[in-house]
Image (cartoon, rainbow, N blue to C red):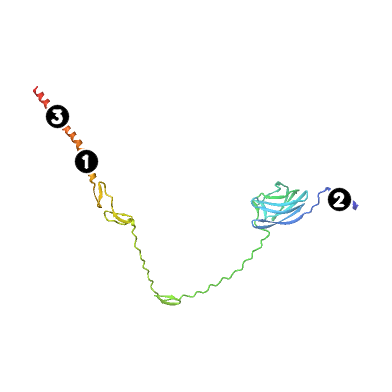
Amino acid sequence: MKSNLVFAFLVASLFLPNLAFAEPGTIQVAVNDSIFDVTYDATGLDVTGIEADVESSTVTVFVTTSDVSSTLEITLDRSFFDSRTAGEDDDFLVLLDGFEATFQESKDDTSRILTVDVLEGTNSVDIIALGSTSFGSGPITEQPEEATPEAVPEETAPEETPELACGPGTVLDNGVCVLEQPEQEEETVTPPAETPKDEMACGPGTVLKDGACVLDETCGPGTILTDGVCVLDQSQVQQVTQSRGMAFDLILPIVAAFVIAFIIMIILWAIGKAGRSKN
């Protein structure tokens, strides 16, 4: 009888999946500078890590399977991760390496427990909150408090010695009141303004050249400089006189011819008039 039981156990171990036992554990995850403890029971797999993504409302559990059929039971404390909409519980979505998985859920007022069937070869289990509320605000594991630095006693400022008051017309000098000496005003000597060379005034008939007044050697039109004095240019006077003489010589014959023609015309008119009167 005993040998039959041993034989049956050996046959069952060959044809049936390996018997696996749940291994409980706790793993920590950081969310918004807070540390949370997440408990789980793993059957046929090992939990190697966990991450939380606040933007996608996802908790990812990294696993390594050792059996054909494995199970992950994870407890989500509501203060850490929850799925709620309008004050009511909402659903979770569970993915195995990106593919939707089947799971069962049990919950109470403080936590929600998910039991996920994990296929062999699975590397990650993604738990996604479909509600508007995902990550909570209360950490389970409290951060160690930083030691408060001891208050440093303030240094007492030395007492100020009251200043000795002196009478009118006196000042305090080395702890003794002495007569106040009137301050001597320094005379401010204003240097004479330099006259720019370009603005130096020169007398009549002179001009400023290279910083010195010299005779103005320029004369007006029709004049020339002679002994430092502008006089009429005789050559130009002669040219003007000659021009006027030539013009007069040209005009005089024309005027004379006009006068002679006028006289002849009057004579001819008188003769013609006398002839008509005889007839």
Q: Which residue is denoted by mark 3 in the rendering?
A: 264
Specify whether 225 is left or right of 120: left
Question: Residue 260 is drawn in which quadrant?
Answer: top left
- Mark 1–mark 2 Cα distance, whole angstroms, equals 159 Å
Q: Name the element at disc 2.
A: helix
Q: Residues within 10 Å of mark 3 (few under 14, many from 20)?
A: few
Q: Which mark is residue 242?
A: 1
Asked whether, in this view, residue 155 is left or right of residue 230, the answer is right
In this view, the mark in front (2 or 3): 3
Say whether marks 1 and 3 touch (CB < 8 Å). Answer: no
In the rendered image, residue 117, in percent from the top left (x then y), is placed at 75, 49
Where does the image place residue 30, in percent across and percent down from the top left?
Answer: 67, 56
Farthest-out residue, bottom? 176
| Disc 2 residue type (three-letter) | Leu
Q: Which amino acid lies under the numbered mark 3 shown in the image of this protein?
A: Ile
Numbered mark located on residue 224 in the image? none
State the residue in front, 226 or 51: 226
The vertical placement of 18 against 141, above or below, is above
Depth order, front residue of 229/126: 229
Res 168 → quadrant: bottom left
Q: Secondary structure at mark 1?
A: helix
Give the x, y percent position of residue 194.
34, 60
Residue named by callout 2? 10
